[in-house]
Amino acid sequence: VDRCLSCLSCMTTCPSGVHYMHLVDHARTHIERTYRRPWPDRALRAVLAAVLPKPGLFRAALIGARLARPFAGLLPGEGQTARRLRAMLKLAPAALPRPATPAGAQVHPAQRVSGDGGRRGRVALLAGCAQTVLGPQINDATIRLLTRMGIEVVVAQGAGCCGALTLHMGKHDAGMEAARANIAAWNREIEGEGLDAIVINTSGCGTTVKDYGFMFRNEPEPWRSRAEAVAARARDISEYLTEIGYAPTRDPAGLTVAYHAACSLQHGQKITGEPKALLRKAGFAVAEPAEGHICCGSAGTYNILQPEIADRLRARKLANIEATRPDLVAAGNIGCITQLSGGTLPVVHTIELLDWMAGGPRPAGVPAGRAAAA
């Protein structure tokens, strides 16, 4: 069970439609409650569960890891603990982006750049946890694009980690607590000025938020109904842009993008065509690498807890991507972006490219192409 990626490809393959996502989460909760792991394993899992969902702690941990990276080779032995620690240090970025805007209620009013003006809709954006530290520009691009399209964007006070990181480590109660905070925050908006959608630009989080109705199926009212209301409004950013009619405003950049399909998006949410169609609409040539159904090895905390398997999957994925001879890579999940970065190609979120071609700034590291850089 520990070595399962939770990539959920079994769910899109199984002809009987077995919902393995729920089964493996149930198994991991049972293991966590009934099996006593060796103390180094317990300690590492406790640290990951405590640090990753909290942006402030996570940022401090990454700064510490960056300082410790030069000494990674001095870690003694080839045991599991040493390998995991080396994997953690290797994943820490050499430099961190500026801190995201402090958490709290934020409203970004709609700004129509064309058409008849006026607000077209109102959505809540899940700002997330790890992504706000590793890639705050992803939320920035999402907000810029949606507000220019006439959508008011709310970052609800009290909403944070979706609960996936702890839930998939078998820490069910912590996952439910995070989900409960989000449900309460978003229902205040639903019952206030209303929400047309809850937009999520991290596909791993989207898979979990869409499952809130199942997670709270045995909870008393009003939590069950509130969870169902949230799950019904949850949309991946590519879904929502397709629904409201994304349109570029810049000339095509003349770049070829290798699209990496995150497992949580293609298998967990069964969203496969929308991101590629949006990239093509924005003027990019889209390359689809071989074995696109196979995981890159990120899988939440998998690349830390199972580094050898994760490294093999990463190498296989990058080889397939590079074989398409693209100019850059696009993905819809911060875990995949982190896992695939550090090679010869820039790796960015799909929304950053869509925002660029609709008037936003060119993403860092992306070649200008023929489009005018802002």
Image (cartoon, grey):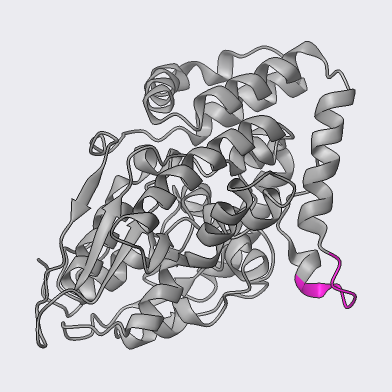
- Residue 293 drawn above or below residue 223: below
Please identify the residue farthest to the front as the structure is shown: 221
State whether residue 315 appears in this view: no
Q: Is residue 17 magenta?
A: yes
Instruction: Give how far across and how far down residue 41 sits, in percent.
Output: 74, 20
Instruction: Give how far across and how far down residue 85 sits, in percent.
Output: 61, 22
- Residue 303 drawn above or below residue 187: above
- The residues colored magenta run 12-18
Q: Residue at x 40, y 62 (%)?
A: 199
**Which image quadrant: the N terminus?**
top right
Q: Is residue 8 magenta?
A: no
Q: Residue at x 38, y 86 (%)?
A: 280
Instruction: Give how far across and how far down residue 238 sits, in percent.
Output: 43, 73
Q: Quadrant of residue 362?
A: bottom left
Q: Residue at x 50, y 33 (%)?
A: 53
Does residue 173 appear to the left or right of 359 in the view shown?
Answer: right
Does residue 204 appear to the left or right of 44 in the view shown?
Answer: left
Magenta stretch secondary structure, dominant: loop
- Residue 288 drawn above or below residue 87: below
**Which image quadrant: the C terminus?**
bottom left
Q: Residue at x 35, y 53 (%)?
A: 189
State whether residue 245 appears in this view: yes
Q: How many marks?
A: 0
Q: Quadrant of residue 366?
A: bottom left
Instruction: Give how far across and how far down residue 285 sits, in percent.
Output: 38, 84
